[in-house]
Image (spheres, rainbow, N blue to C red):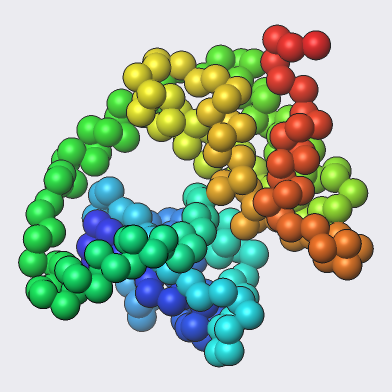
Amino acid sequence: FANVVVGDEINRASPKAQSALLECMEEHQVTVDGQTHALPHPFMIMATQNPVEMEGTYPLPEAQRDRFMARVSVGYPDPRAEVEMLDHHGAASPLDDVRPVTDAEGVVELIRVVRRVHASEAARRYVVDVAAATRSHSAIRLGASPRATLHVLRAARARAALAGRDHVLPDDVQALAVPLLAHRIILTSEAHVSRLTPAGVVEDVIARTRVPGRR
C-alpha cells in the first residue's frame, strides 16, 4: 500500500507470486478474503529482472508483461562509472544522499499535464497502425494488444510534454516503440531460428508503417 512498489528480480518469483500482481497492476486494488482494498493514487509498479538465461528465472506471463508500460535494458556501467561506484559505495551508503524530488501530489499534477497534450486523429491513427502491423507481421506470433496501444499514446504524450510541446508527433511514437512494444510481442519459431530479436522486429514494423502526412 505505497505509491511506488518495486519488485526486485521479479522473474525469480514463482508464477503464483507473479500472478498475484495482476489485480493491483490493472485494477489498482487488492482482494484478500473476499474484501477489496483500494490502492493509493498515484500507484505504479517498477521491477527489475535478471536475464532469462540465468538459472532460477521464470519467464513472465504474457498478461503480466502487457501490464508493464515499458521495459528498459540497463546493461553494464562503463569502466569509469564502475570505478566511481566502488569509490562511493566504499566510503558511505549511497542511500544517505537520496533526497525526495517530488511527492504524490506533484506526480498527480504531472499526470494532469500529460493528459492535456493534444493527440490529433492522424497521430492516434498512426499508433493504431503500428500496433496493427505487429499483429500481421510474418515474424510475430502474438502482436501488440489494445492495452499496448493505450500505453504507447500515453507515453507519447509524456514525451511531448517533456520536450515542451503541447501535441504528439510521430517521432514520439517511433522513439518509444521498442521499449514499449518489444517486451509484449512473441516471435514465431522461424524468427527465433533466424536469430531475430523482438527489438529488431519492432524496428522493422516502424520502418514499414507509413507515417501520416508522408508519401
Residue 189, above or below 68? below
Along the viewing direction, whichever of 129 and 56 lies nearer the viewer: 56
Along the viewing direction, whichever of 127 and 139 lies nearer the viewer: 139
Query: Left or right: 10 with respect to 211?
Result: left
Is residue 44 visible to the viewer in this orientation of the structure? yes
Quadrant hosting residue 129: top right
Query: Left or right: 96 with respect to 30?
Result: left
**Image quarter of the C terminus:** top right
Horizontal and vertical percent position of residue 196: 80, 58
Residue at point 62%, 70% (across, down): 61
Along the viewing direction, whichever of 89 and 168 lies nearer the viewer: 89
Looking at the image, how many numbered discs can be counted on the residues?
0
Residue at point 38%, 71% (across, down): 7
Is residue 20 visible to the viewer in this orientation of the structure? no
Residue at point 50%, 55% (across, down): 72
Outermost residue toward the bottom in this view: 56
Horizontal and vertical percent position of residue 44: 35, 55
Along the viewing direction, whichever of 153 and 8 lies nearer the viewer: 8
Residue at point 49%, 63% (across, down): 75
Horizontal and vertical percent position of residue 212: 70, 15
Residue 31, above or below 139? below
Horizontal and vertical percent position of residue 49: 48, 72
Query: Left or right: 49 with respect to 138?
Result: left
**Image quarter of the N terminus:** bottom left
Residue 175, above or below 66? above
